[in-house]
Amino acid sequence: MGMHHFDSSPDTGADSGDNRPWYASMNRYHWFVLVVAALGWLFDCLDQQLFILARPQAMADLLKDYKADPNYDFAFWSRTFGDISTSVFIAGWATGGLVFGMLGDRIGRAKTMLITILLYSLFTGLSAFSITVYDFAFYRFLTGLGVGGEFAVGVALVAEVMPSRARTQSLALLQAFSAFGNISAAFINLGLGLAEGEGMQASPWRIMFCIGALPALLALVIRRKLKEPERWEQASHTGAVEKQLGSYRELFREPTLRKHALLGLALACSGVIGLWAVGFYTPDLIREVQLKPITAQVFERQIAAAKSGGDSDPAKIEQLFDLWKAGKYAKPPEELSAVKEAVEKEVKPILTANQSFTSIAINVGAFFGMFGFGMLSQVIGRKPTFAIALLAAFFTTLTVFYVLEEFWQIWVLVPIMGFCQLSLFGGYAIYFPELFPTRLRSTGTSFCYNVGRFLAALGPLVKIGLNYLFSGTAEPMRYAGMTMCGVFLIGLMVLPFLPETKGRPLPE
């Protein structure tokens, strides 16, 4: 019976003299809200990561008719269409964030969360039935609408329901558990890649998107059990005539809120662009830089096996090896097509596995980074923690894109980069709800977090230009990523003008 009741006592700030552990102040309903919001964001991130990992395979499959055309730079165009679909997805994310962030303040957190989860689940599933790069991008835009809306209402819900002493840690935990969604996607990618190597006929990326439709089941739990926060209920019935809920006009009318919104947007741009235009291309980078050495290893094994066989023809395999060195996508003579196909079939699962391991490594670091931000910000404050995280993200990402090549580096360097990059997102979940009053909390949080995505949507397009600029190099993605790392420094410029909110109650 106590499931639908929660502590509605005034928020007096985190430092209230209570020496109990933060989690001791939470009752059953608090934990229920945290679990539901965390699952909503976890599945949201699962769908995001499924797209990131499926992107190279999907582009290769949807553009396969052009692969053998000697006048078509298959490698460049598959990367380019992958970047375009990413930009379209992020633009959908930003649009959905603005619309559903405002809706979260107007119709309620729980109702809006229900709509967004159904939306991103449905269109992730429909992405599996794409037949061209164009309808694929269209489905990604519609998926982005739901993905963008879920975050703002989720953090507003948790911020308003939790006791003040548990708010920071709960929001950090909410964001940290998103790493499990990303890791789950990596294991799905890994398992399907291995299955493909064993002869599975279905396209792994299509199966991945079908799996991404399953989070819709969470909507049933939300519909039955989740209630609107008492803070929102009070705000929606008190002073609604004078102060409209979920209004961007209201947000920008007050100078302080306008300042918080614009500076928060700049702060968010650093992490969002840095992650989506640089960090999340690390699995693609490892796939690119390891293609040649892994293919060479496979050829060596094939040649060694052919030489040890009595009735094999090693000269034919040697000829194919020379052909591969001349051009990865060169069309071989008819008699060598089957041999080349056999080599590619062996190479692809290895690349997919290493891509999956890279994603897992990023997100193992991310879990500790996001929760760690919450812990450190409770000690030294929000702004100093952001400053440390932004500098760390810049230096570690630059290092990874400069040196990443060997398998061992996936497990040493990449988790450190993930820790630093994703710690920023733990900060966003904690900090943005503390900048806005209840009537505009979801709207303001969504503005900061999602308008930045319109700018972030340009990141992959800028990267297309950088890929072209560095196309004369052996690894254009490496140098494009290093150039883009400067975006992490933007946040440092606005931090001095933002307020410190450590220990302060949520604004009413």
Image (cartoon, rainbow, N blue to C red):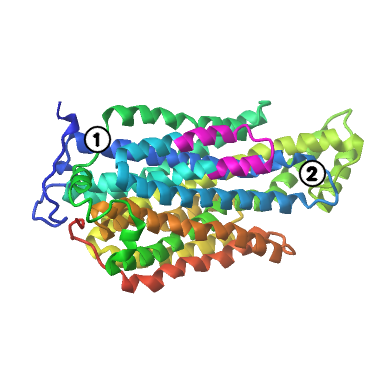
Note whether 333 is above or below 272 in the view shown: above
Under mark 1, the amino acid is Lys
Choose between 250 and 72: the one closer to the eye: 250
Taking 480 as reference, is 22 left or right? left
Task: Give neighbour class at mark 1: few <14, some 14-19, many 20+ (Cα, 10 Å).
Answer: some
Residue at (70, 66) in percent of width and height: 469
Can you tell which mark lies on residue 227?
1
Taking 99 as reference, is 407 left or right? right
Query: Magenta stretch?
Result: 119-141
Q: Earlier in the sequence, mark 1 or mark 2?
A: 2
Residue highlighted by disc 2: 66
Q: What is the x, y in percent for residue 435?
A: 28, 60
Choose between 318 and 32: the one closer to the eye: 32
Closer mark to the observer between disc 1 and disc 2: 1
Choose between 393 and 490: the one closer to the eye: 490
User: Mark 2 falls on what kind of element?
Assistant: helix
139 drawn magenta: yes
Under mark 2, the amino acid is Tyr
Q: Main secondary structure of the magenta part?
A: helix
Note whether 52 is above or below 188 in the view shown: below
Choose between 429 and 188: the one closer to the eye: 429
Q: What is the x, y in percent for residue 4?
A: 19, 32
